[in-house]
Amino acid sequence: MSLYDIIFYLFAAITILSGFIVVTSKNIVYSAFSLLFTFFGVAGIYVLLGADFIAIVQILVYVGGILILLLFGVMLTNKITNVDIRTGTIHVLPGAVAVGVLMGLLLSAMVWTEWKTQPSETPVTTTVTLGRLLITDYILIFELLGILLLIALIGAASIARREQE
């Protein structure tokens, strides 16, 4: 067992345990903070897979944007911090059967698939490759998307200004 395997299992355990806490916790603040660790665990697994750009986007978008917005919403609302979330046990048996069937399908796919493995070489970061593609082959599309976003921003500001008057 190599160091990468140990780090992968550590990130997988963090992701699974914190995801379990997100689902089962009755306190919304604990669920939100556990979601933070879930997102970081997924980003760590992306780094181990060599998808550094997706890992950075995971941290910036989900942790930096969505989760912080959720935490501010929870923290700034005084009455919601003491409210317990109802975790009803209405459909436990059908849910357990569905999860068991899905888990069996996934495990059988993992066991019976002939996975192709190749010796690893020097890793090439995906950000360098994406940057080169965006500045060489896809420069026209990249610039047109920038102009489209600028037009959308100007339109949103114009609509907001009209509604304010």
Image (cartoon, helix red, strand yellow):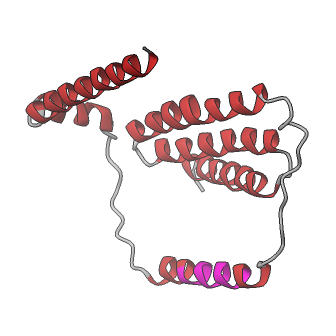
Residue drawn at (53%, 42%) of the image: 43
Q: Which of 51 and 114 is in front in this view?
A: 51
Q: Does the magenta stretch include residue 24?
A: no
Q: Give the range drawn in magenta.
A: 96-105
Does residue 91 appear left or right of residue 113 in this picture?
Answer: right
Relative image position of residue 71 (x, y in whole percent): 70, 32
Question: Would you place residue 154 above or below residue 145 in this image?
Answer: above
Q: Is the magenta stretch mostly helix, strand or loop?
A: helix
51 lies left or right of 3: left
Residue depicted at x 38% and y 36%: 53
* Magenta segment includes 99: yes
Which x, y percent locates residue 69? 62, 30
| The quadrant where residue 67 appears | top right
Report the residue at 8% width, 36% height from top.
Answer: 137
| Quadrant of the rendered image containing residue 1 | bottom right
Where 137 sits versus 119, above or below?
Answer: above
